[in-house]
Amino acid sequence: MKKFVWFVLGIAGGFIAAHFLNKDPRGHELLAEVDARITEFTDRIGDAYREQEARFSGLVSDAKDAASAAVDKAQDVASAAADKVQEATAAAADAAQDAAAAAANAVQSAAAKLDD
């Protein structure tokens, strides 16, 4: 608690000293120069922050585009595979139907020969 009190007293003392310093024309000029330097520093930091933010935004946008392209490609591949499976299934069904018809014809032929 003692350190906090000293901290608050230091801040209050700084404000009082700055007030008295601001009353003097030379002190006013000095404080204006310090304020200008602080403003310049904060402006530079703000510009650097916005520049980095723009870079990251560009990287994120590029990553989104790449991910979207990868998803589209995967959908195309999956669609093509599904089409191939459907074609193979249809061909197998046709072959099975043809084989069943041939077997039925063979059975009918054999039955007709037995009847004769």
Image (cartoon, rainbow, N blue to C red):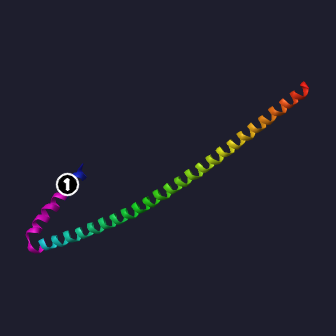
22 within the magenta span: yes
Q: What residue is drawn where x is 51% and y is 57%?
A: 69
Specify the segment rendered in magenta: 11-27
Q: What residue is drawn where x is 19% and y is 58%?
A: 11
Q: What residue is drawn where x is 23% and y is 52%?
A: 4
Q: Nearer the viewer, residue 18 or 101?
A: 101
Number of numbered discs overlaid on the protein picture: 1
Kindly identify which residue carries mark 1: 8
Q: Position of residue 73 (x, y in %)?
A: 55, 55
Q: Position of residue 108 (x, y in %)?
A: 83, 29
- Local SS, label 1: helix
- Image quadrant of residue 50? bottom left
Examine the rendered structure and indicate whether residue 87 appears above or below residue 31. above
Q: What residue is drawn where x is 40% and y is 64%?
A: 55
Q: Amino acid at mark 1?
A: Val
40 on left or right of 31? right
25 on left or right of 94? left
- Image quadrant of residue 97? top right
Q: Nearer the viewer, residue 91 or 14?
A: 91
Circle 1 crowding by C-alpha within 10 Å: few under 14, some 14–19, many from 20: few
20 within the magenta span: yes
Examine the rendered structure and indicate whether residue 101 appears above or below residue 59. above
Q: Position of residue 98 (x, y in %)?
A: 76, 38
Q: Quadrant of the C terminus?
A: top right
Q: Nearer the viewer, residue 114 or 14?
A: 114
